[in-house]
Image (cartoon, helix red, strand yellow):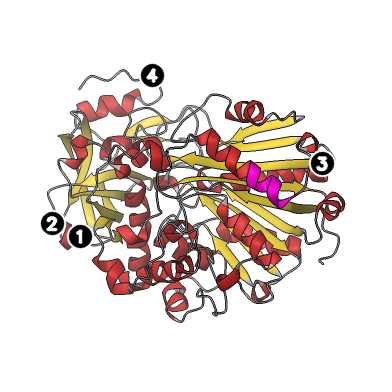
Amino acid sequence: MATNPRVAIAGVGEARGGRATGKTTVQLYAEAFLDLLADCPIDPASIDGVLTSSPDAEPHHMFSTWLVEYLGLRPTFTSAVQMGGATPHSNMALAAALVESGRCRAVMVADGDNRASKFSRQDKVQAMSSQVGHLSSLEPPHEFDGPYGPTAPALYGMMATRHMYEYGSTPEQFARIAVAFRAHGALNERAQLRKPVTVEDVLASPVIAWPLHRDECALISDWGSAILVTTPEYASELRRDPVYLLGLGQAHQGYNPYQAPSITSFPIRESADAAFAAAGISRDEVDVLELYDSFTSTAMVTLENMGFCGPGEGGAFVEAGNIDLGGSLPTNTHGGLLSYNGGHGHFIVEATRQLRGECGERQVADAKIAVSQGTAALASSSITLVLGT
Amino acid sequence: MTTERVNTVTQPYWDGVEQGKLMLQYCSACGAYQHYARPLCAKCRAAEPEWREASGKGVLYSYSVVHRGPSPAFQSIAPYVTAIVELEEGPRMFTNIVDAEPELLRVGEPVRVVFRDGPEGLRLPYFTPAGG
Protein backbone atom coordinates (compact mmCIF):
# COMPACT_ATOMS: atom_id res chain seq x y z
CA MET A 1 0.00 0.00 0.00
CA ALA A 2 1.13 3.51 -0.78
CA THR A 3 2.22 5.88 1.93
CA ASN A 4 -0.64 7.65 3.64
CA PRO A 5 -3.31 7.72 0.96
CA ARG A 6 -6.18 9.94 2.04
CA VAL A 7 -8.80 8.89 -0.50
CA ALA A 8 -9.91 5.43 -1.59
CA ILE A 9 -12.23 3.76 -4.08
CA ALA A 10 -14.41 1.23 -2.25
CA GLY A 11 -16.47 0.04 -5.18
CA VAL A 12 -17.34 0.39 -8.85
CA GLY A 13 -20.35 -0.42 -10.97
CA GLU A 14 -21.51 -0.28 -14.55
CA ALA A 15 -24.82 -0.41 -16.37
CA ARG A 16 -25.40 -2.93 -19.11
CA GLY A 17 -24.84 -0.43 -21.88
CA GLY A 18 -23.40 -0.51 -25.33
CA ARG A 19 -25.59 -0.37 -28.40
CA ALA A 20 -29.05 1.19 -28.18
CA THR A 21 -30.68 -0.33 -25.11
CA GLY A 22 -33.91 1.65 -25.15
CA LYS A 23 -33.15 2.82 -21.63
CA THR A 24 -33.37 6.36 -20.31
CA THR A 25 -30.28 8.06 -18.95
CA VAL A 26 -31.46 7.96 -15.35
CA GLN A 27 -32.26 4.27 -15.76
CA LEU A 28 -28.66 3.63 -16.87
CA TYR A 29 -27.45 5.52 -13.79
CA ALA A 30 -29.72 3.33 -11.63
CA GLU A 31 -28.27 0.17 -13.15
CA ALA A 32 -24.75 1.37 -12.46
CA PHE A 33 -25.76 2.20 -8.89
CA LEU A 34 -27.17 -1.30 -8.32
CA ASP A 35 -24.01 -2.81 -9.80
CA LEU A 36 -21.98 -0.67 -7.40
CA LEU A 37 -24.04 -1.93 -4.45
CA ALA A 38 -23.36 -5.48 -5.60
CA ASP A 39 -19.65 -4.68 -5.65
CA CYS A 40 -19.49 -2.84 -2.33
CA PRO A 41 -21.66 -3.59 0.71
CA ILE A 42 -22.37 0.02 1.66
CA ASP A 43 -25.68 1.05 3.20
CA PRO A 44 -27.04 3.55 0.64
CA ALA A 45 -28.08 5.77 3.54
CA SER A 46 -24.37 6.29 4.22
CA ILE A 47 -23.76 7.87 0.81
CA ASP A 48 -23.53 11.55 1.69
CA GLY A 49 -22.23 12.88 -1.63
CA VAL A 50 -23.66 12.35 -5.12
CA LEU A 51 -21.80 13.78 -8.12
CA THR A 52 -23.12 13.26 -11.62
CA SER A 53 -22.51 14.39 -15.16
CA SER A 54 -24.89 16.67 -17.03
CA PRO A 55 -26.44 14.31 -19.59
CA ASP A 56 -25.98 15.32 -23.22
CA ALA A 57 -28.50 13.16 -25.07
CA GLU A 58 -31.28 13.84 -22.59
CA PRO A 59 -30.41 17.23 -21.14
CA HIS A 60 -31.99 17.62 -17.74
CA HIS A 61 -32.38 20.57 -15.42
CA MET A 62 -30.65 19.89 -12.05
CA PHE A 63 -29.88 16.31 -13.03
CA SER A 64 -28.08 15.28 -9.84
CA THR A 65 -31.10 16.16 -7.70
CA TRP A 66 -33.30 14.02 -9.92
CA LEU A 67 -30.90 11.12 -9.58
CA VAL A 68 -30.93 11.53 -5.79
CA GLU A 69 -34.73 11.31 -5.88
CA TYR A 70 -34.71 8.41 -8.35
CA LEU A 71 -32.35 6.35 -6.18
CA GLY A 72 -33.90 7.35 -2.85
CA LEU A 73 -30.70 8.92 -1.55
CA ARG A 74 -30.32 11.76 0.96
CA PRO A 75 -26.83 13.29 0.54
CA THR A 76 -25.46 16.45 2.13
CA PHE A 77 -23.72 17.42 -1.12
CA THR A 78 -24.73 16.96 -4.75
CA SER A 79 -23.72 18.53 -8.04
CA ALA A 80 -24.01 17.87 -11.77
CA VAL A 81 -20.75 18.71 -13.48
CA GLN A 82 -20.12 19.39 -17.16
CA MET A 83 -16.53 18.75 -18.21
CA GLY A 84 -17.09 16.86 -21.44
CA GLY A 85 -15.19 13.60 -21.60
CA ALA A 86 -13.31 14.43 -18.41
CA THR A 87 -16.45 14.82 -16.31
CA PRO A 88 -15.96 11.69 -14.19
CA HIS A 89 -12.32 12.68 -13.64
CA SER A 90 -13.42 16.15 -12.61
CA ASN A 91 -15.94 14.62 -10.22
CA MET A 92 -13.25 12.33 -8.80
CA ALA A 93 -11.22 15.43 -7.97
CA LEU A 94 -14.25 17.04 -6.33
CA ALA A 95 -15.06 13.84 -4.45
CA ALA A 96 -11.47 13.63 -3.23
CA ALA A 97 -11.64 17.21 -1.96
CA LEU A 98 -14.93 16.50 -0.17
CA VAL A 99 -13.54 13.36 1.47
CA GLU A 100 -10.15 14.83 2.35
CA SER A 101 -11.74 17.87 3.95
CA GLY A 102 -14.10 15.72 5.99
CA ARG A 103 -17.07 17.37 4.32
CA CYS A 104 -18.30 13.98 3.07
CA ARG A 105 -17.47 10.40 3.98
CA ALA A 106 -18.85 8.41 1.04
CA VAL A 107 -19.26 10.11 -2.35
CA MET A 108 -20.71 8.41 -5.40
CA VAL A 109 -19.25 9.61 -8.70
CA ALA A 110 -21.77 8.58 -11.32
CA ASP A 111 -21.83 9.04 -15.08
CA GLY A 112 -24.20 8.02 -17.82
CA ASP A 113 -25.87 8.88 -21.10
CA ASN A 114 -28.14 7.17 -23.59
CA ARG A 115 -26.70 8.52 -26.81
CA ALA A 116 -27.07 5.27 -28.73
CA SER A 117 -30.78 5.01 -27.93
CA LYS A 118 -31.53 8.69 -28.21
CA PHE A 119 -29.74 9.17 -31.49
CA SER A 120 -30.81 5.90 -33.07
CA ARG A 121 -33.32 7.47 -35.41
CA GLN A 122 -31.10 10.16 -36.84
CA ASP A 123 -27.67 10.40 -38.29
CA LYS A 124 -25.53 9.83 -35.23
CA VAL A 125 -22.69 12.02 -36.39
CA GLN A 126 -25.10 14.88 -37.00
CA ALA A 127 -26.73 14.34 -33.64
CA MET A 128 -23.44 14.17 -31.79
CA SER A 129 -22.15 17.24 -33.52
CA SER A 130 -25.17 19.32 -32.76
CA GLN A 131 -25.82 18.11 -29.24
CA VAL A 132 -22.49 17.32 -27.72
CA GLY A 133 -20.76 20.62 -27.47
CA HIS A 134 -19.86 21.37 -31.05
CA LEU A 135 -22.98 23.17 -32.04
CA SER A 136 -23.93 24.39 -35.42
CA SER A 137 -25.13 27.57 -33.83
CA LEU A 138 -24.67 31.30 -33.91
CA GLU A 139 -24.86 31.62 -30.17
CA PRO A 140 -21.80 31.97 -27.94
CA PRO A 141 -19.48 30.18 -27.64
CA HIS A 142 -20.08 28.81 -31.13
CA GLU A 143 -20.75 32.14 -32.83
CA PHE A 144 -17.38 31.94 -34.59
CA ASP A 145 -17.12 28.28 -35.49
CA GLY A 146 -20.68 26.95 -35.65
CA PRO A 147 -21.42 28.61 -39.01
CA TYR A 148 -18.57 26.64 -40.61
CA GLY A 149 -19.99 23.18 -39.98
CA PRO A 150 -17.56 21.84 -37.40
CA THR A 151 -17.98 18.32 -36.06
CA ALA A 152 -16.13 16.57 -33.29
CA PRO A 153 -14.30 14.33 -35.79
CA ALA A 154 -13.32 17.43 -37.79
CA LEU A 155 -11.79 19.11 -34.75
CA TYR A 156 -9.78 16.03 -33.82
CA GLY A 157 -9.02 15.48 -37.48
CA MET A 158 -7.34 18.89 -37.47
CA MET A 159 -5.33 17.69 -34.48
CA ALA A 160 -4.14 14.71 -36.53
CA THR A 161 -3.40 16.84 -39.60
CA ARG A 162 -1.27 19.22 -37.55
CA HIS A 163 0.52 16.33 -35.87
CA MET A 164 1.38 14.86 -39.27
CA TYR A 165 2.68 18.25 -40.39
CA GLU A 166 4.80 18.88 -37.30
CA TYR A 167 6.20 15.39 -36.84
CA GLY A 168 5.70 13.42 -40.03
CA SER A 169 3.38 10.93 -38.35
CA THR A 170 1.38 8.72 -40.70
CA PRO A 171 -2.23 7.54 -41.03
CA GLU A 172 -0.93 4.01 -40.37
CA GLN A 173 0.46 5.10 -37.00
CA PHE A 174 -2.84 6.64 -35.92
CA ALA A 175 -4.69 3.54 -37.11
CA ARG A 176 -2.33 1.33 -35.07
CA ILE A 177 -3.87 2.81 -31.91
CA ALA A 178 -7.34 1.66 -32.97
CA VAL A 179 -5.91 -1.78 -33.68
CA ALA A 180 -4.46 -2.02 -30.16
CA PHE A 181 -7.63 -0.95 -28.39
CA ARG A 182 -9.78 -3.26 -30.50
CA ALA A 183 -7.48 -6.16 -29.64
CA HIS A 184 -8.11 -5.37 -25.97
CA GLY A 185 -11.85 -5.06 -26.52
CA ALA A 186 -11.80 -8.46 -28.22
CA LEU A 187 -10.81 -9.92 -24.82
CA ASN A 188 -13.63 -8.11 -23.03
CA GLU A 189 -16.98 -9.86 -23.22
CA ARG A 190 -18.79 -6.58 -22.50
CA ALA A 191 -17.10 -4.60 -25.26
CA GLN A 192 -19.34 -3.10 -27.93
CA LEU A 193 -16.93 -4.02 -30.75
CA ARG A 194 -14.91 -7.22 -30.37
CA LYS A 195 -13.80 -8.16 -33.86
CA PRO A 196 -10.04 -7.59 -34.22
CA VAL A 197 -9.00 -5.21 -36.97
CA THR A 198 -5.79 -4.52 -38.84
CA VAL A 199 -4.26 -1.19 -39.79
CA GLU A 200 -5.51 -1.84 -43.33
CA ASP A 201 -9.05 -2.44 -42.06
CA VAL A 202 -9.04 0.82 -40.10
CA LEU A 203 -7.80 2.81 -43.07
CA ALA A 204 -10.38 1.11 -45.31
CA SER A 205 -13.27 2.15 -43.05
CA PRO A 206 -15.19 5.21 -44.29
CA VAL A 207 -13.59 8.63 -43.90
CA ILE A 208 -15.61 10.64 -41.38
CA ALA A 209 -13.39 13.71 -41.28
CA TRP A 210 -10.09 13.25 -43.06
CA PRO A 211 -7.61 12.11 -41.86
CA LEU A 212 -9.87 10.25 -39.41
CA HIS A 213 -11.76 7.13 -40.42
CA ARG A 214 -14.81 5.58 -38.77
CA ASP A 215 -12.75 3.06 -36.81
CA GLU A 216 -10.73 5.91 -35.31
CA CYS A 217 -13.78 7.60 -33.78
CA ALA A 218 -15.34 6.98 -30.38
CA LEU A 219 -18.33 4.69 -30.25
CA ILE A 220 -21.76 6.15 -29.68
CA SER A 221 -23.15 4.19 -26.76
CA ASP A 222 -25.54 3.91 -23.90
CA TRP A 223 -23.67 3.73 -20.63
CA GLY A 224 -23.70 4.14 -16.91
CA SER A 225 -20.92 3.96 -14.34
CA ALA A 226 -20.66 4.54 -10.61
CA ILE A 227 -17.63 4.80 -8.33
CA LEU A 228 -17.67 5.03 -4.54
CA VAL A 229 -15.04 7.42 -3.19
CA THR A 230 -14.37 7.36 0.54
CA THR A 231 -11.71 7.45 3.24
CA PRO A 232 -9.12 4.66 3.35
CA GLU A 233 -10.47 3.69 6.79
CA TYR A 234 -14.07 3.35 5.66
CA ALA A 235 -12.96 1.60 2.45
CA SER A 236 -11.12 -0.99 4.53
CA GLU A 237 -14.29 -1.64 6.50
CA LEU A 238 -16.24 -2.14 3.28
CA ARG A 239 -13.82 -4.38 1.40
CA ARG A 240 -10.50 -6.16 1.74
CA ASP A 241 -8.94 -4.76 -1.42
CA PRO A 242 -9.64 -1.04 -1.74
CA VAL A 243 -7.84 0.99 -4.34
CA TYR A 244 -6.26 4.29 -3.39
CA LEU A 245 -6.09 7.65 -5.09
CA LEU A 246 -2.38 8.39 -4.89
CA GLY A 247 -2.27 11.61 -6.82
CA LEU A 248 -4.25 13.86 -9.08
CA GLY A 249 -3.50 16.83 -11.23
CA GLN A 250 -5.53 19.20 -13.35
CA ALA A 251 -4.83 21.92 -15.89
CA HIS A 252 -7.28 23.92 -17.96
CA GLN A 253 -6.58 26.46 -20.69
CA GLY A 254 -9.87 27.07 -22.45
CA TYR A 255 -12.60 25.70 -24.64
CA ASN A 256 -12.41 26.60 -28.31
CA PRO A 257 -9.89 24.61 -30.38
CA TYR A 258 -8.92 27.65 -32.43
CA GLN A 259 -7.97 29.47 -29.24
CA ALA A 260 -5.55 26.79 -28.03
CA PRO A 261 -1.89 27.86 -28.30
CA SER A 262 -1.18 24.48 -29.94
CA ILE A 263 -3.40 21.61 -31.05
CA THR A 264 -0.67 19.01 -30.55
CA SER A 265 0.66 20.15 -27.18
CA PHE A 266 -1.77 20.65 -24.33
CA PRO A 267 -1.74 21.19 -20.54
CA ILE A 268 -1.87 17.40 -20.23
CA ARG A 269 1.83 17.61 -19.37
CA GLU A 270 1.13 19.88 -16.38
CA SER A 271 -1.70 17.74 -15.01
CA ALA A 272 0.34 14.55 -15.43
CA ASP A 273 3.41 16.08 -13.80
CA ALA A 274 1.30 17.26 -10.85
CA ALA A 275 -0.38 13.87 -10.46
CA PHE A 276 2.86 11.89 -10.65
CA ALA A 277 4.56 14.25 -8.21
CA ALA A 278 1.67 14.00 -5.76
CA ALA A 279 1.81 10.22 -6.00
CA GLY A 280 5.58 10.22 -5.66
CA ILE A 281 6.01 7.97 -8.68
CA SER A 282 7.85 8.14 -11.96
CA ARG A 283 6.32 7.37 -15.32
CA ASP A 284 8.10 4.05 -15.64
CA GLU A 285 6.27 2.80 -12.55
CA VAL A 286 2.90 2.98 -14.32
CA ASP A 287 1.59 -0.55 -14.95
CA VAL A 288 -1.66 0.33 -16.73
CA LEU A 289 -2.85 3.46 -18.53
CA GLU A 290 -6.50 4.20 -19.24
CA LEU A 291 -6.65 7.33 -21.39
CA TYR A 292 -9.48 9.22 -23.00
CA ASP A 293 -9.45 8.10 -26.62
CA SER A 294 -12.23 10.04 -28.30
CA PHE A 295 -10.20 9.63 -31.49
CA THR A 296 -6.88 8.04 -32.37
CA SER A 297 -5.42 11.56 -32.54
CA THR A 298 -6.50 12.22 -28.94
CA ALA A 299 -4.69 9.09 -27.80
CA MET A 300 -1.55 9.88 -29.83
CA VAL A 301 -1.25 13.40 -28.46
CA THR A 302 -2.08 12.28 -24.92
CA LEU A 303 0.64 9.62 -24.88
CA GLU A 304 3.18 12.24 -25.95
CA ASN A 305 1.90 15.05 -23.75
CA MET A 306 1.84 12.79 -20.68
CA GLY A 307 5.53 12.21 -21.25
CA PHE A 308 5.44 8.48 -21.95
CA CYS A 309 7.30 9.29 -25.13
CA GLY A 310 8.67 12.49 -26.61
CA PRO A 311 6.82 14.96 -28.85
CA GLY A 312 6.33 13.34 -32.24
CA GLU A 313 7.44 9.93 -30.99
CA GLY A 314 3.92 8.63 -30.40
CA GLY A 315 3.72 6.92 -33.79
CA ALA A 316 6.89 4.90 -33.29
CA PHE A 317 5.84 4.26 -29.67
CA VAL A 318 2.55 2.62 -30.66
CA GLU A 319 4.06 0.78 -33.64
CA ALA A 320 6.59 -0.80 -31.27
CA GLY A 321 3.69 -2.34 -29.35
CA ASN A 322 4.17 -0.37 -26.14
CA ILE A 323 0.43 0.24 -25.62
CA ASP A 324 -0.56 -3.38 -26.29
CA LEU A 325 -1.29 -5.87 -23.55
CA GLY A 326 2.14 -7.35 -22.92
CA GLY A 327 3.82 -4.08 -23.93
CA SER A 328 5.60 -1.63 -21.66
CA LEU A 329 2.48 0.47 -21.09
CA PRO A 330 -0.74 -1.51 -21.62
CA THR A 331 -3.30 1.14 -22.50
CA ASN A 332 -7.09 1.07 -22.58
CA THR A 333 -7.16 -2.53 -21.48
CA HIS A 334 -10.98 -2.61 -21.62
CA GLY A 335 -10.98 -1.39 -25.22
CA GLY A 336 -11.54 2.31 -24.55
CA LEU A 337 -14.02 4.54 -26.32
CA LEU A 338 -12.98 3.02 -29.65
CA SER A 339 -13.94 -0.55 -28.76
CA TYR A 340 -15.45 -0.99 -25.30
CA ASN A 341 -18.03 1.78 -24.97
CA GLY A 342 -18.30 5.51 -25.64
CA GLY A 343 -18.82 6.18 -21.92
CA HIS A 344 -16.45 8.35 -19.94
CA GLY A 345 -16.46 6.77 -16.47
CA HIS A 346 -15.24 3.36 -17.60
CA PHE A 347 -11.60 4.40 -17.61
CA ILE A 348 -11.63 4.78 -13.83
CA VAL A 349 -13.71 1.62 -13.37
CA GLU A 350 -11.24 -0.36 -15.50
CA ALA A 351 -8.22 1.11 -13.70
CA THR A 352 -9.79 0.03 -10.40
CA ARG A 353 -10.55 -3.47 -11.65
CA GLN A 354 -7.04 -3.90 -13.04
CA LEU A 355 -5.62 -3.00 -9.64
CA ARG A 356 -7.99 -5.50 -8.01
CA GLY A 357 -6.85 -8.17 -10.46
CA GLU A 358 -10.34 -8.88 -11.79
CA CYS A 359 -9.80 -8.50 -15.52
CA GLY A 360 -9.44 -12.08 -16.67
CA GLU A 361 -7.85 -12.43 -20.08
CA ARG A 362 -7.06 -8.74 -20.29
CA GLN A 363 -5.52 -8.53 -16.82
CA VAL A 364 -2.12 -6.88 -16.59
CA ALA A 365 -0.07 -9.12 -14.32
CA ASP A 366 0.63 -7.72 -10.89
CA ALA A 367 -0.71 -4.24 -11.69
CA LYS A 368 0.05 -1.90 -8.79
CA ILE A 369 -0.16 1.56 -10.37
CA ALA A 370 -2.90 2.53 -12.82
CA VAL A 371 -3.34 5.96 -14.35
CA SER A 372 -6.63 7.26 -15.67
CA GLN A 373 -6.30 10.30 -17.89
CA GLY A 374 -9.26 12.48 -18.80
CA THR A 375 -9.21 15.21 -21.42
CA ALA A 376 -11.87 17.51 -22.80
CA ALA A 377 -12.25 20.55 -25.07
CA LEU A 378 -9.89 19.06 -27.66
CA ALA A 379 -7.43 18.51 -24.82
CA SER A 380 -7.43 21.98 -23.35
CA SER A 381 -8.78 20.49 -20.13
CA SER A 382 -6.76 17.70 -18.60
CA ILE A 383 -7.26 15.70 -15.42
CA THR A 384 -4.87 12.93 -14.39
CA LEU A 385 -5.63 10.37 -11.68
CA VAL A 386 -2.97 8.03 -10.28
CA LEU A 387 -4.49 5.01 -8.57
CA GLY A 388 -2.69 2.29 -6.68
CA THR A 389 -3.05 -0.65 -4.35
CA MET B 1 -30.38 34.95 -43.26
CA THR B 2 -31.35 37.39 -40.54
CA THR B 3 -30.18 36.36 -37.15
CA GLU B 4 -31.16 37.59 -33.74
CA ARG B 5 -27.84 37.97 -32.03
CA VAL B 6 -27.77 38.99 -28.40
CA ASN B 7 -24.13 39.91 -28.35
CA THR B 8 -23.37 43.60 -28.61
CA VAL B 9 -19.65 42.98 -28.04
CA THR B 10 -19.24 41.08 -31.30
CA GLN B 11 -21.55 43.21 -33.47
CA PRO B 12 -18.72 45.27 -35.04
CA TYR B 13 -17.22 42.01 -36.34
CA TRP B 14 -20.46 41.09 -38.09
CA ASP B 15 -20.96 44.64 -39.34
CA GLY B 16 -17.47 44.34 -40.88
CA VAL B 17 -18.39 41.08 -42.58
CA GLU B 18 -21.37 42.80 -44.22
CA GLN B 19 -18.94 45.41 -45.59
CA GLY B 20 -16.38 42.85 -46.73
CA LYS B 21 -13.94 43.68 -43.93
CA LEU B 22 -12.35 41.28 -41.49
CA MET B 23 -12.32 43.06 -38.14
CA LEU B 24 -10.15 42.20 -35.14
CA GLN B 25 -9.92 43.67 -31.70
CA TYR B 26 -6.66 45.46 -30.91
CA CYS B 27 -5.48 46.26 -27.40
CA SER B 28 -3.73 49.62 -27.29
CA ALA B 29 -2.40 48.80 -23.81
CA CYS B 30 -0.36 45.71 -24.79
CA GLY B 31 -0.47 45.70 -28.59
CA ALA B 32 -2.18 42.31 -28.89
CA TYR B 33 -4.83 41.51 -31.46
CA GLN B 34 -7.59 39.12 -30.52
CA HIS B 35 -10.34 37.09 -32.13
CA TYR B 36 -13.09 36.65 -31.00
CA ALA B 37 -14.35 39.90 -29.50
CA ARG B 38 -14.52 40.34 -25.74
CA PRO B 39 -15.05 43.33 -23.44
CA LEU B 40 -11.44 42.95 -22.29
CA CYS B 41 -8.04 41.99 -23.64
CA ALA B 42 -7.53 38.37 -22.59
CA LYS B 43 -3.76 38.92 -22.59
CA CYS B 44 -3.38 41.98 -20.33
CA ARG B 45 -6.97 42.38 -19.10
CA ALA B 46 -7.23 46.00 -20.26
CA ALA B 47 -10.86 46.99 -20.85
CA GLU B 48 -12.53 47.71 -24.17
CA PRO B 49 -10.08 46.83 -26.93
CA GLU B 50 -10.48 48.92 -30.08
CA TRP B 51 -11.40 47.56 -33.53
CA ARG B 52 -9.05 47.38 -36.51
CA GLU B 53 -9.40 45.92 -39.96
CA ALA B 54 -7.19 42.90 -40.49
CA SER B 55 -5.08 42.40 -43.60
CA GLY B 56 -7.07 39.27 -44.45
CA LYS B 57 -3.81 37.37 -44.94
CA GLY B 58 -2.78 34.32 -42.99
CA VAL B 59 -1.48 30.78 -43.14
CA LEU B 60 -3.29 27.48 -42.92
CA TYR B 61 -2.64 26.20 -39.38
CA SER B 62 -4.56 22.93 -39.80
CA TYR B 63 -7.57 21.45 -41.53
CA SER B 64 -9.86 18.48 -41.88
CA VAL B 65 -11.98 17.36 -44.81
CA VAL B 66 -15.46 16.74 -43.45
CA HIS B 67 -17.37 13.90 -45.10
CA ARG B 68 -20.18 13.76 -42.54
CA GLY B 69 -21.66 17.18 -41.88
CA PRO B 70 -23.49 18.29 -38.74
CA SER B 71 -26.73 19.25 -40.48
CA PRO B 72 -28.54 18.62 -43.76
CA ALA B 73 -27.26 21.97 -45.09
CA PHE B 74 -23.64 20.97 -44.47
CA GLN B 75 -24.18 17.38 -45.52
CA SER B 76 -25.33 18.69 -48.89
CA ILE B 77 -21.98 20.41 -49.50
CA ALA B 78 -19.78 17.62 -48.08
CA PRO B 79 -16.94 16.98 -48.44
CA TYR B 80 -15.91 20.44 -47.29
CA VAL B 81 -12.84 21.73 -45.48
CA THR B 82 -12.91 23.02 -41.91
CA ALA B 83 -9.75 24.83 -40.96
CA ILE B 84 -7.93 26.94 -38.44
CA VAL B 85 -6.18 29.89 -40.04
CA GLU B 86 -3.46 31.87 -38.30
CA LEU B 87 -3.85 35.51 -39.26
CA GLU B 88 -0.92 37.77 -40.03
CA GLU B 89 -1.85 39.79 -36.94
CA GLY B 90 -1.50 36.73 -34.69
CA PRO B 91 -4.94 35.41 -33.74
CA ARG B 92 -6.27 32.17 -35.13
CA MET B 93 -9.79 31.73 -36.40
CA PHE B 94 -12.04 28.87 -37.37
CA THR B 95 -13.14 28.88 -41.00
CA ASN B 96 -13.63 26.88 -44.17
CA ILE B 97 -11.17 26.76 -47.03
CA VAL B 98 -13.04 27.39 -50.28
CA ASP B 99 -12.14 27.29 -53.98
CA ALA B 100 -9.46 24.67 -53.40
CA GLU B 101 -8.87 20.99 -54.04
CA PRO B 102 -8.68 19.44 -50.55
CA GLU B 103 -5.99 17.00 -51.76
CA LEU B 104 -3.71 19.90 -52.69
CA LEU B 105 -3.93 21.78 -49.39
CA ARG B 106 -0.77 22.07 -47.34
CA VAL B 107 -0.48 23.10 -43.70
CA GLY B 108 1.49 26.34 -43.58
CA GLU B 109 0.44 27.59 -46.99
CA PRO B 110 -0.64 31.22 -47.37
CA VAL B 111 -4.35 31.94 -47.51
CA ARG B 112 -6.46 35.06 -47.90
CA VAL B 113 -9.93 36.04 -46.86
CA VAL B 114 -12.97 36.03 -49.16
CA PHE B 115 -16.57 36.81 -48.22
CA ARG B 116 -19.42 34.53 -49.23
CA ASP B 117 -22.89 33.47 -48.20
CA GLY B 118 -22.64 30.16 -46.35
CA PRO B 119 -24.76 27.01 -46.70
CA GLU B 120 -27.08 28.29 -43.99
CA GLY B 121 -27.42 31.68 -45.73
CA LEU B 122 -25.18 33.66 -43.41
CA ARG B 123 -22.52 35.93 -44.93
CA LEU B 124 -19.15 34.83 -43.57
CA PRO B 125 -15.43 35.29 -43.99
CA TYR B 126 -13.83 32.27 -45.67
CA PHE B 127 -10.27 31.64 -46.75
CA THR B 128 -8.77 30.48 -49.99
CA PRO B 129 -5.20 29.56 -50.99
CA ALA B 130 -3.23 32.70 -51.83
CA GLY B 131 -0.74 30.91 -54.05
CA GLY B 132 3.02 31.31 -54.07
Question: Distance from label 4 to label 3 (Cα)?
Answer: 44 Å
Q: Residue furthest front?
A: A38
Asked if residue B76 shows in the view, the reply is yes
Question: Distance from label 3 to label 2 (Cα)?
Answer: 60 Å
Q: Which residues are magenta?
A: A34-40
Q: Which chain does the residue under circle 1 lie in? A: B
Label 2 vs 4, first from the N-terminus: 4
Residue B101 got which mark? 2
Between tags 4 and 3, which lies in front? 3
The residue where tag 1 is placed is: B105
Seen in the picture, residue A324 relative to A190 is either above or below; the reply is below
Foreground of the two, A155 or A350: A350
Give the percent coordinates (x, y) of residue A97: 76, 44
Identify which amino acid the numbered label 3 is placed on.
Arg
Q: Which chain does the residue under circle 4 lie in? A: B
Give the percent coordinates (x, y) of residue B1: 20, 22
Asked if residue B35 shows in the view, the reply is no
Residue A105 got which mark? 3
The residue where tag 4 is placed is: B6
Task: Say what secondary structure mark 1 lies in.
Answer: loop
The crowding category of the residue bearing disc 2, from other C-alpha atoms within 10 Å (few below 14, some 14 to 19, many at least 20), is: few
Question: Distance from label 1 to label 3 (Cα)?
Answer: 56 Å
